Amino acid sequence: MAFRSADQIIHKAAWLYYTHGLRQDEVAQRLGISRASVALHLRRAREAGIVNISTSTDLFRADMMARRLEDASGLDGVWLSREGDFSPDAASEIPKLAASVFLEMVGNGDRVGVAWGRTIYAIADVMSHADLRDVTVVELCGNLGSPYAYRPDQCIMEIARRLNARGLNFYAPLVLSSERLAGELRAEPVIREQLERVSECDLALFTVGTLDEDSHAVRCGALGRQELAKLRSMGAVGVIAGQVIAADGTQLDCDYNRRVISADFDAVKAIPKRLMVVQEDEKFEPLLAAINGRFATHLVLTARMAARLLERANVAAGVETPAPASA
């Protein structure tokens, strides 16, 4: 979708004013225009019906780099955040952008699966309220204590609150001390039913985690440092819904994964719409693994990360990487 320059400035003004809550003088300063121009653009946005979030996010999908990444990866939708237009750091824009994209994708009567993580916490914090009906938000993996603002179960309930939805937490630990205990817990009727119903979800929201000493899995206590080193030596590169994956996107055959209480990957991939959100640059290798594993249908990330993915794809295909489009 091509935007004329006049359309772009209207969308940018509406995004900053309605989504970020900036004053008109702050919008004017950010965009380098007069306050009177901001007022005019906001009036035109209202008249054209483009002040809702669903239309505003079209600006982030209009980038040619997003189109190329969709073609290269087979994704249904890609949204890119760049430096300059809305924030000095594109990564800081990701939670707001992802929350807006997520709200576009969820509808009345949907069952939504959510796998918690630091990025999902940030999305929950900035998500706008939506007056939806008959929506259920379910947790895709077990719980652990968290060193952040709130626990995983609270993250799920906060998203449900923003959607006017019913929240369904996973009241089981993420990692058990033995395979036997994990198997017995999965066989419990309540846990078994929740795991079996994952594939009934209409939409999933998740991220992919790193496997380093500062990763969410380590800081939450799911992984000890010795076990982390062992998993990495076996080829583990990332974490999805509490489970570790190899570079080709397959579930690693390891003791840790057999002790995890989480949704089966086949059930996750059976969900029609799967929105993956990646904020940090250090998640490049885990992101590449997740794409290789076909986990996502839709993706929100920075233009920096998209450029790296395209460069990798072009190197693999033996073609020259096009110069990035200007912001």
Image (tube, rainbow, N blue to C red):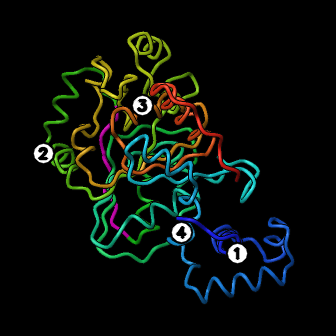
- Disc 4 versus disc 3: distance between alpha carbons? 28 Å
Task: Say above or below: 96 vs 255.
Answer: below
Q: Nearer the viewer, mark 1 or mark 4?
A: 1
Q: Residue at image x 79%, y 77%?
A: 24
- Numbered circle sitting on residue 6: 1
- Magenta-colored stretch includes residue 263: no
Residue type at mark 3 is Val
Q: Which residues are magenta?
A: 165-174
Q: Which callout, 4 or 2, points at the residue further toward the start of the chain?
A: 4
Mark 4 — residue?
Answer: 128
Q: Which callout, 1 or 4, points at the residue further toward the start of the chain?
A: 1
- Disc 4 versus disc 2: distance between alpha carbons? 35 Å
Numbered disc 3: secondary structure: strand
- Disc 1 versus disc 3: distance between alpha carbons? 42 Å
Q: Which callout, 1 or 3, points at the residue further toward the start of the chain?
A: 1
Q: Which callout, 4 or 3, points at the residue further toward the start of the chain?
A: 4
- Magenta-colored stretch includes residue 170: yes
Residue 303 is left or right of residue 124, and the answer is right
Numbered disc 4: secondary structure: loop
Mark 3 — residue?
Answer: 239
Residue type at mark 2 is Pro
Mark 2 — residue?
Answer: 189
Numbered disc 1: secondary structure: helix
Task: Tally the marks.
Answer: 4
Q: Residue at image x 12%, y 45%?
A: 189
- Disc 1 versus disc 2: distance between alpha carbons? 57 Å
Rate crowding at label 1 as few (under 14), some (14 to 19) or many (20 or more) other CA atoms within 10 Å: few
